[in-house]
Amino acid sequence: MRSTRAAAVALAGGATLLALTAAPATAVTTGPKPPARSVDCGQASNGLQVIAVTTKGSTACGTAHRVAEAWLGADQQDGRKAVVVHVDGARWKCREKQGDPNPSTECVKFKDRAEKVQLFS
């Protein structure tokens, strides 16, 4: 009986030691994303105006220009309604939208639909 009780005390002491040495839990807060904002990124190589609609910071225009250039280099004459381009390891779906008076193109990031690139003439 004595050895069983000693083992139980030793086990309890080990559990206490384990509990004291374990890393503290960190709280994960998930709140609403910041609102998307439009950033004027200048012109693409063909003169289209490039707008980044983003929740990201200062890298938005660099990405927007790479998406615009990928869309400009894609084969758009095969009758598809949308063109998928790959930029910085992400896929973007680009399609023409009817505008007033001119159409525009909008590219939306597959994994984060709040991220967009808009091209206007």
Image: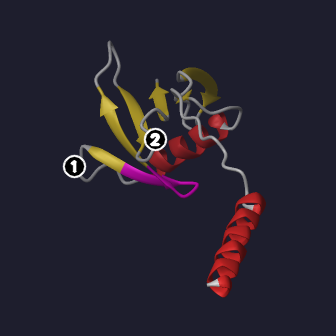
Instruction: Classify mark 2: residues with Cα within 10 Å, few (<14), some (14-19) or many (20+).
Output: few
At label 2, the amino acid type is Asp
Residue 2 in picture, x, y percent from top left: 67, 83
Relative to residue 78, is residue 49 drawn left or right?
right
Which residues fall within the magenta stretch?
Answer: 84-91
Question: Which of the numbered marks, if any, corresponds to residue 39?
Answer: none
Main SS of the magenta part reads strand
Which one is closest to the eye, mark 2 or mark 1?
2
Residue beneath label 1, please?
79
User: Residue reaching furthest front?
Assistant: 1
At label 1, the amino acid type is Gly
Q: Residue at x 47, y 51 (%)?
A: 73
Among the 4 quarters of the image, the one containing residue 42: top right
Q: Is residue 3 above or below residue 30?
A: below
Q: Is residue 71 above or below residue 30?
A: below
Q: Earlier in the sequence, mark 2 or mark 1?
A: 1
Residue beneath label 2, please?
112
Q: Is residue 66 above or below residue 106?
A: below
Q: Could one spot residue 45 in this view of the protein?
A: no
Depth check: give the residue in front, 39 or 29.
Answer: 29
* Total numbered labels placed on residues in the image: 2
Relative to residue 99, is residue 88 drawn left or right?
right
| Quadrant housing the N terminus | bottom right
Q: Secondary structure at mark 2?
A: loop
Looking at the image, what colour scheme do you see? secondary structure
Q: Could one spot residue 69 in this view of the protein?
A: yes
Q: Residue at x 70, y 80 (%)?
A: 6
Q: Residue at x 72, y 61 (%)?
A: 22
